[in-house]
Image (spheres, grey):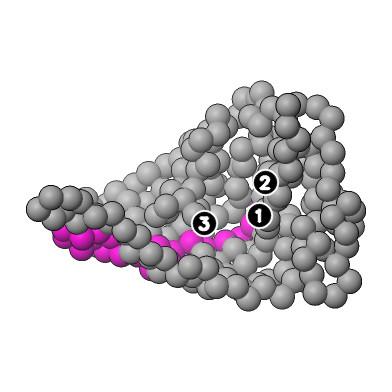
Amino acid sequence: GYRVLLIDLDSQASLTNLFGVTPELDPDMPTSYDLIRSEGPLPASDIIRKTNFPTVADPEGSELNQVHLAYSPEEELTFKFGRQVVILDNHRFVGDVGWRQNQQTFDAASFLWAPTAALDVFYAFVDNVNRVFGDDSPVGDHRMASNLVNVGYDVEGWGRAAAYAYLLDYDSVDTNSTNTLGARFAGAHAFDSFELLYGAELASQSDTAANPNDVDQDYL
């Protein structure tokens, strides 16, 4: 067989967690950042960690997936309170990790306002993220006090435009506390002999709250 090197550049270290390594519990553990930093980078041999066992990416377990109260004072407005699924745009920043057996959900208070068929406004205050690793994992929950805002508009015949602000203030993992502001447009348009699919997104992310890192990144 082949030896495979997996490189985890995700700030939440999801891939690393799958192999039973928890950076949050070992803050001095070298990461991929130490390999590429400009001052005193470490050799790759100090970063690479061997795995000696097969990984079960979806641990066995049972937990409460969703339970919430929903209230709609009028047809275009819905409030939800409790454990719920939140999926925004293309899942890039907020989603349910739907390809995993254990779905990610959010303990949150949210509302969705759709005053027209084309326009919708979503807001959520998130208290906790119930992650795919399950309640028995030390990183199975992420406590936070975060705000999610997403405004979308459907352009008939062309696609959907969206603007968003995801203001994440983690209690459990300070290095994940970031503010992300962005906009995207994606859709499809039919021509006489073919259909054109397209999408573009621009976002800017910065550190916030107690994050000790200097985060200033653009995403395209």
Name the residue tied to disc 1: 10
Determine the image quadrant of residue 32.
bottom right
Residue 148 is a magenta residue: yes
Q: Position of residue 123 (x, y in %)?
A: 42, 60
Q: Nearer the viewer, mark 3 or mark 1?
A: 1
In the drawing, what numbered circle is on residue 14?
2
Would you call the spot at circle 1 few (<14 residues within 10 Å), some (14-19), or many (20 or more)? few
Q: In the rendered structure, are the residues bearing label 2 and label 1 in contact, judged by CB atoms less than 8 Å apart? A: yes
| Residue 210 shown left or right of residue 200 in the figure | right
Name the residue tied to disc 3: 93
Q: Is residue 70 visible?
A: yes
Q: Is the magenta region chiefly helix, strand or loop?
A: strand
Q: Determine the residue positioned at 68% across, 55% down.
A: 9
Q: Determine the residue positioned at 52% across, 68% down.
A: 219
Amino acid at circle 1 = Asp
Amino acid at circle 2 = Ser
Q: Position of residue 122 (x, y in %)?
A: 38, 59
Determine the image quadrant of residue 57.
top right
**Residue at the front extreme, as displayed:** 1
Q: Earlier in the sequence, mark 2 or mark 3?
A: 2
